[in-house]
Image: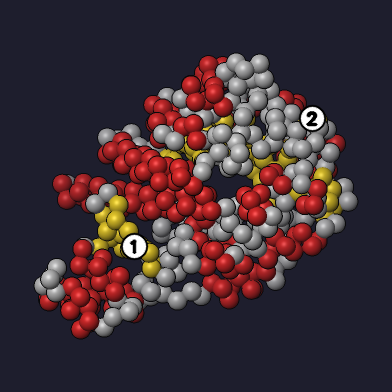
Amino acid sequence: MVHQYKSNGYNIVMDINSGSVHIVDDVAYDIVKLYEDLSLEEILKELYLAYSKEAIIEAYNEITVLKEEERLYAKDDYEEYIVDFKKRPTVVKALCLHIAHDCNLACQYCFAEEGEYHGHRELMSLETGKAALDFLIRNSGSRYHLEVDFFGGEPLMNFETVKQLVIYGRSLESLHHKRFRFTLTTNGVLLNDEIIEFINEEMSNVVLSVDGRREINDLMRPFRNGKGSYDLIMPKFKKLVADRKQQDYYVRGTFTRFNKDFAKDVLALHDLGFDQISVEPVVADLHQPYAIREEDIQEICEEYDRLAIEMIKRNEEGRGFNFFHFMIDVSGGPCVAKRLSGCGSGTQYLAVTPWGDIYPCHQFVGQEEYLMGNVDSGIRRLDIQAEFKQSNIYAKDKCRECFARFYCSGGCAANSYRFHKSINDTYEIGCELMRKRVECAIMIKAALADEEERKADDE
């Protein structure tokens, strides 16, 4: 499969199965469209008014070499691999610990219902948390690195348990030949000097929730009394990131139909000194006024273009930053298994409620049909585990012909279930935006490569 498009003055040709990306001139770009269906003689007739015979033949021969090298029109060899992958024993490598089913904010778009997750407010006990870490070790096989994300609601509402679980986890490492990588997601309300110091010592990564500009953040992320949270959290986030020396964190926001000009929110966060930024589209039922609709897609895609061009400009000025959805490694990327089957939810990655119940991921919590077991008794619903193990890009008809399939790995199972009651379907709006982000990310790579080449020529 080949995907080609024009962006910011670049003619970009992607070979999906090999992962090769080519920046080509106009004649090669037009020949790529015709190469598989027409002979050289037919292509000469088709393009003779636009290009010289010599230029067409030269480009045609170069494309033929790329095909022979399997860097264009490469065959898909991955479908056989996924059959072998599905036979492998299931090893759990990561837990999302719902340390608090409670929150001190009332974000409008929160899928967790202010931390309640279709249930009730509760904080995880230390005993349940320890049982979860023990469960992870028992089910991790020979894997050395294990990941635990402290999540909510707002996990800092249960900070003492977070601290004690980190201590407990560290006590298990040498005994079981494991290493925990702890992470935490916070809205920042309860941050103070003590907590910031602890996070920066013990958390391998931290996610700081803020939606961008003050007016946007305070519209969507207020306290329960309606007061905005921006002025309280922003100084704390700045301090945490400064103390962390801009490493191993990102500020994560959500954009909605109310701020389709979300590039301004990304850039506002960068102007405040944040270099690791993620602002993601809301996923919401269409009856919600803030939900993104099909008619919004074109406008949002154009906004991604604006953001990409501004990122290139800032990089050239020596003040570049990372935007999570544009971070694509075209030289290798994730392992084959991850490219084919995604995040590992329901198999390698599980969520644990405050009372120890296990779900495929945090977005399935509260969906009783996906209750898999408990940290004390283990996984009882092996059929759910098998369902997720079978889920991959080849199990989804809509993914088979999509050029972005190896970048998104089939999309989010929870979003698919939310809109189609099946984990093997897709969320179409999310797919459209994902495809655009991939195109922007590749274009940025091309522009940065151009910049490096210009610098080398100047030296």
**At 20% from the left edge and 49% from the top edge, which residue is drawn?**
454
Amino acid type of disc 2?
Arg
> Label 2: how many residues lie within 10 Å, few (<14), some (14-19) or many (20+)?
some
Q: Position of 357 compared to 416: left or right?
A: right
- Outermost residue toward the right? 377
Q: Is residue 304 visible?
A: no
Please provide percent x and percent y for residue 367.
76, 46
Q: Position of 236 compared to 91: left or right?
A: left
The relative height of residue 379 versus residue 273 in the rendered view (above or below) is below
State how the image is colored.
secondary structure
Amino acid type of disc 1?
Gln
The relative height of residue 114 versus residue 172 in the rendered view (above or below) is above
Q: Which mark is residue 121?
A: 2
Q: Position of 86 compared to 234: left or right?
A: right
Q: Which mark is residue 4?
A: 1
CB within 8 Å, label 1 to label 2:
no
User: Along the polypeptide, which appears first: circle 1 or circle 2?
Assistant: 1
Q: In terms of image quadrants, where is residue 262? A: top left
Q: Is residue 97 visible?
A: yes
> Label 1: how many residues lie within 10 Å, few (<14), some (14-19) or many (20+)?
some
**At 48% from the left edge and 67% from the top edge, which residue is drawn?**
401
